[in-house]
Image (cartoon, helix red, strand yellow):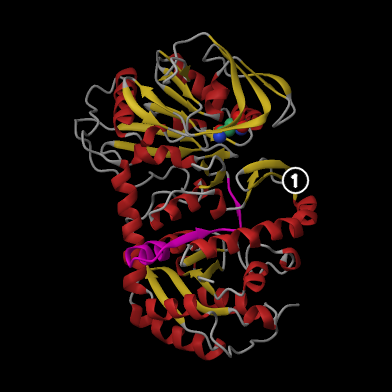
Amino acid sequence: MSGALLVAGTTSDAGKSVLVAGLCRWLARSGVRVAPFKAQNMSNNSMVTPDGGEIGRAQALQAAACGIEPSVRFNPVLLKPGSDRSSQVVVLGRPVGVTTALSYRARKSELMETVLATLADLRSDYEVVVCEGAGSPTEINLRASDIANMGLARAANLPVLVVGDIDRGGVFAHLFGTLALLDPADQALISGFVINKFRGDPALLEPGLRQLHSLTGRDVLGVVPWSEDLWLDAEDSLSYAADGVVGRPAPPVGTQWLRVAVVRLPRISNATDVEALACEPGVSVRFVTEPSRLADADLIVLPGSKSTVDDLGWLRRTGLADAVMAHARRGLPVVGICGGFQMLGTGIDDRVESGAGAVEALGLLDVDVEFAAEKVLTRPQGTVFGEPAVGYEIHHGRVTRCEHEGLVALPDGSTEGVVDGAILGTHWHGLLENDDARRAILRWAAEWSGRDGFKPASDTSFATARATQLDILGDLVENHLDTTAIRRLIDNGPPTPLPFIPPGAP
Ligand SMILES: NC(=O)CC[C@H](N)C(=O)O
């Protein structure tokens, strides 16, 4: 059996997924055949794998860090929340139904079998599998049915690293409490800690690291500094502060900025679609939740949504729909992606996702959409404004009537999406990652918004920007983690004996 490790976090967003990506990059650069694994992910940021299924985007990014194609095996269970209480359950890439938190617990043992079989399979194909936990391993109310953290680690005897975010404060209590509320058998697997997002003088931290060791018998195996340059592929859009500019855009190549406002829908999906715009010099991208923030936008983007009809209702209730309509009436450009595209049409007939039936949409495009039970999961290619492009589609809604010119010319002579004057809609995710097509769309947006002084840079490469981020993560791991100790854990499992820290599980 090959080596493996599980990275757990004291909180969501402690940095598990980037640490896993960094560990994958470090191992891949040292010539190790490595794969990522997240037993269960809860996210509406997903992508389509070449083996035809859907997984969390974080695992696709980690696969890229490993230098391999994404596969459904890297994330066998994906929960896509459509509301606060229900999620679509995706198993090995395919939707198998909608579940509430309580009914999901009943399915856990069956899912655990899938998870363990998938991990065993990966471990026979790769030298190392780096696993990512979900949330905190010490959700004591959920421990009995856990399949993603200690439940998985125990079943597969995985050494566990716990990562904590020091930027929020309280990291020592978080790390100590995460360990001390686990039962003895779980604690026996907690093999070390990592402190993430540290800014400041390491000498000041040093006594705390020693104290944590004497309290727990475990080492801090790395203090990872805060990195200003890491922002691409954030796990979910919640980590973008509303109104904050996404990324660190360089000044414009021309004389003017292009200001892009992306509506942060409550059930936004694939928020990362707009990150490619944020890589462009002179493009400022902000997520907004409030109508006044649309007033000075040149381009409005309505992104994907896991709950199109519900999010359309929210758009109306918040006054954002009126602000989008006012923007469109001024002849300014609007881009709708997937769920956002569906909102731009005349009507939506949805007996699948919301069960609402026929609903009036914004009416900016003469397009009807009808939802079907079967989910579209594809990786199409075509041309957009004459430029080659690839994308991926994840949706139940289908266009049943379209009175406009298509946006994407497909190889079979048909089209996808719409471009009608200043309104552009597509079901494609990832469209903006295509450099030439993105530049063409930026030129289109600048023209309709009257930003004559905005010029897209000729040389922005999104693939390079993403690869650079992965290398930064690999460098952080190599330079700030005790990679010898981590390699030992991966190869030999948890060290014994590790002390039990009371009180243990309640
Ligand atoms: N990815 C999306 O935006 C999906 C849109 C919509 N929820 C559908 O399933 O059709």
Q: Is residue 379 above or below residue 5?
A: above
Give the amino acid type for the residue marked by disc 1 in the picture. Thr
x then y, percent, for residue 245: 38, 44
Residue 38 in sight from this viewpoint: yes
Q: Residue at x 21, y 33 (%)?
A: 458
Q: Is 96 left, or right, of 288 in this rendering?
A: right
Mark 1: C-beta under 8 Å from nearest atom of ligand 1: no
Above or below — where is 195 with respect to 334? below
Chain part drawn in magenta: 22-43
Q: Nearer the viewer, residue 167 or 141?
A: 141
Residue 8 x/y as whole percent = 55, 68
Tell whether position 97 is magenta. Answer: no
Q: For this rendering, which residue is in front, 491 or 453?
A: 491
Q: Secondary structure at mark 1?
A: strand
The residue depicted at 76 percent of the width and 77 percent of the height is 506
Ligand 1, image quadrant it occupies: top right
Image quadrant in which the N terminus is located: bottom right
Front position in the image: 198 or 88 = 88
Residue lying at the far top in this picture: please name it. 403
Query: Foreground residue, 456 or 103?
Result: 103
User: Which residue carries the number 1 mark?
Assistant: 99
Within 10 Å of disc 1 (Cα), the crowding (few <14, some 14-19, many 20+) is some
Q: Is residue 295 visible?
A: no
Please identify the quarter of the rendering in which residue 24 is found. Answer: bottom left
* Residue in the image at 45% along x and 73% along y: 195
Query: Image height check: is 398 above or below 237?
Result: above
